[in-house]
């Protein structure tokens, strides 16, 4: 991780309000945010049923992370493990775990678990590469 995170501090997160980096959370009490995370502008996180974001996770701009889906009434905790990267404009649905070191390509719809050390892309997400070995 670059030196820009040498003095990283968690942002102030208020219910339904934009952080200083212009992303927002509903259900703040359900969010567990790891160290040295990087979440892009205009990302929305619904943590009403739990969202755990591991250390060194990067989430692009304009992503949506839903622990609750009002469209199909699904709900469940989302876990994004350490060093995972989620590309801009991606959607993560309830109950999904994204594995350690995995990469989710931009514009991907993630509606099932993604294992460690893979690259997944598409609508819905599909694995296109294994053992990415990110450090």
Image: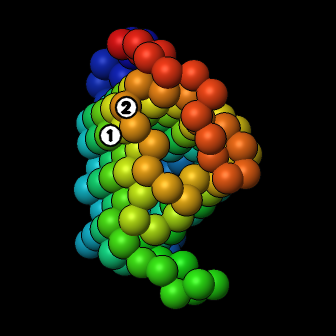
Left or right: where 135 falls relative to 129: left
In the picture, the disc for residue 72 is none
- Residue 66 higher or lower than 1, as above or below: below
Visible residue check, residue 70: yes
For the N terminus, the image quarter is: top left
- Pointer 1: residues within 10 angstroms few (<14), some, or many (20+)? many
Q: Which dot, 2 or 1, sits closer to the camera?
A: 2
**Residue at which label 1 appears:** 81
Q: How far apart are marks 2 and 1 (CA)?
A: 8 Å
Q: Can residue 18 be seen in this view?
A: no
Q: Residue 83 appears in which quarter of the rendering?
A: top left
What secondary structure is marked by label 1?
loop
Residue 51, picture quadrant: bottom left
| Residue at (54, 79) in percent of width and height | 69
Q: Element under label 2?
A: loop
**Image spot of residue 40 (x, y percent):** 58, 43
Say which residue appears at 40% left-offset and 37% top-offset: 115
* Residue toward you, 18 or 79: 79
Q: Find residue 116 and name its label.
A: 2
Would residue 59 appear left or right of 121 to someone viewing this image?
left
Q: Give the quadrant of the C terminus.
A: top left
The front one of 27 and 22 is: 27
Q: Horizontal and vertical percent for residue 2?
A: 42, 13
Position above or below: 48 against 33: below
Q: Label 1 near label 2: C-beta < 8 Å?
A: yes
Front-most of residues 4 and 131: 131
**Crowding near the residue tagged with mark 2, few <14, some 14–19, many ≥20 C-alpha atoms within 10 Å:** many
């Amino acid at each position: 991780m670059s030196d820009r995170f040498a003095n990283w501090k968690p942002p102030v997160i208020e219910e339904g309000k934009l952080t200083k980096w212009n992303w927002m959370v509903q259900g703040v009490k359900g969010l567990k945010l790891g160290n040295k995370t990087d979440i892009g502008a205009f990302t929305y996180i619904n943590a009403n049923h739990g969202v755990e974001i591991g250390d060194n996770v990067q989430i692009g701009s304009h992503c949506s992370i839903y622990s609750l889906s009002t469209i199909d009434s699904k709900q469940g905790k989302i876990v994004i493990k350490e060093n995972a990267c989620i590309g801009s404009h991606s959607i993560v649905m309830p109950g999904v775990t994204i594995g350690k070191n995995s990469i989710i390509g931009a514009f991907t719809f993630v509606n099932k678990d993604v294992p460690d050390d893979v690259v997944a892309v598409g609508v819905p997400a599909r694995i296109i590469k294994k053992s990415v070995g990110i450090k």
